Image (tube, grey):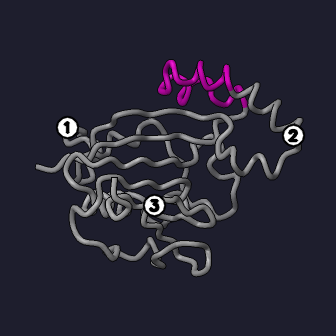
Amino acid sequence: MDPKHKLNIGSGRFPKEGYTNVDHRMGVGAEIVHDLDQFPYPFKDSEFDLIEADHVLEHLRKPFHAMKEVHRLLKPGGVFHMRVPHFSRGFTHPEHEHGFDVSLPLYFNPSFEGGYEGVEYELKNMRLEWMAQRYLKKITLSPFQYSIGVIIAAPLNFLANLSPHACSRIWCFWVGGFEEVEYKFICVKS
């Protein structure tokens, strides 16, 4: 896939090769500097096949607005792959505005009478992660701590993802919460 058809929003210090990288800060490796709380984003309608957002929407004032903007930028059938903090541990960072839950996809389903947001995404996959952003953990934890975390995370992730809804609603706090919920959405346009 051509890099101009893949967008990484909120790239921070981790720009992705083969993507157009966007961040609000200069000097971090992003090709485009733009405040993601300012709409519209500087791209044409239906320009991208794939948009990724790795731990960025929780920092925005209005994440639903950002998801609507991503919808505008995606081609029909395009993929929006996002990772965000699960609400059970979402506020461990002082700049997080939001935590997310397994109910997020409902707001992008036209049959949801409780608050459909006006743009449609089909949920392709949802996954909970007990130990997220391992690329950061490798540089902040000792090798021993990192290894123990990986060992503990494996069975917890397996059990949680048998039923993310049951985990998110019932037992996630028994294990100290989950760091991340990952969604893969397909953009539906009529």
Residue picked out by circle 1: 111
Question: Could you classify mark 1 by the number of other residues whose Cα lies within 10 Å: few (under 14), some (14-19), or many (20 or more)?
Answer: few
Question: Sequence-wise, which precedes: disc 1 or disc 2?
Answer: 1
Residue picked out by circle 3: 8
Give the Cα distance between marks 1 and 3: 30 Å
Q: In the structure shown, which secondary structural element does the residue marked by tag 3 occupy?
A: strand
Q: Is 103 situated above or below 50?
A: above
Q: Amino acid at mark 1?
A: Ser
Q: In the structure shown, which secondary structural element does the residue marked by tag 1 occupy?
A: loop
| Residue 159 falls within the magenta-colored stretch | yes
Give the Cα distance between marks 1 and 2: 48 Å
Q: Is 135 situated above or below 23?
A: above
Question: Could you classify mark 2 by the number of other residues whose Cα lies within 10 Å: few (under 14), some (14-19), or many (20 or more)?
Answer: few
The magenta stretch is 154-175
In the rendered structure, the answer to whether residue 160 lies left or right of residue 22 reads: right
User: Is the C-beta separation of discs 1 and 2 under 8 Å?
Assistant: no
Residue picked out by circle 2: 143
In the rendered structure, the answer to whether residue 53 lies left or right of residue 87 reads: left
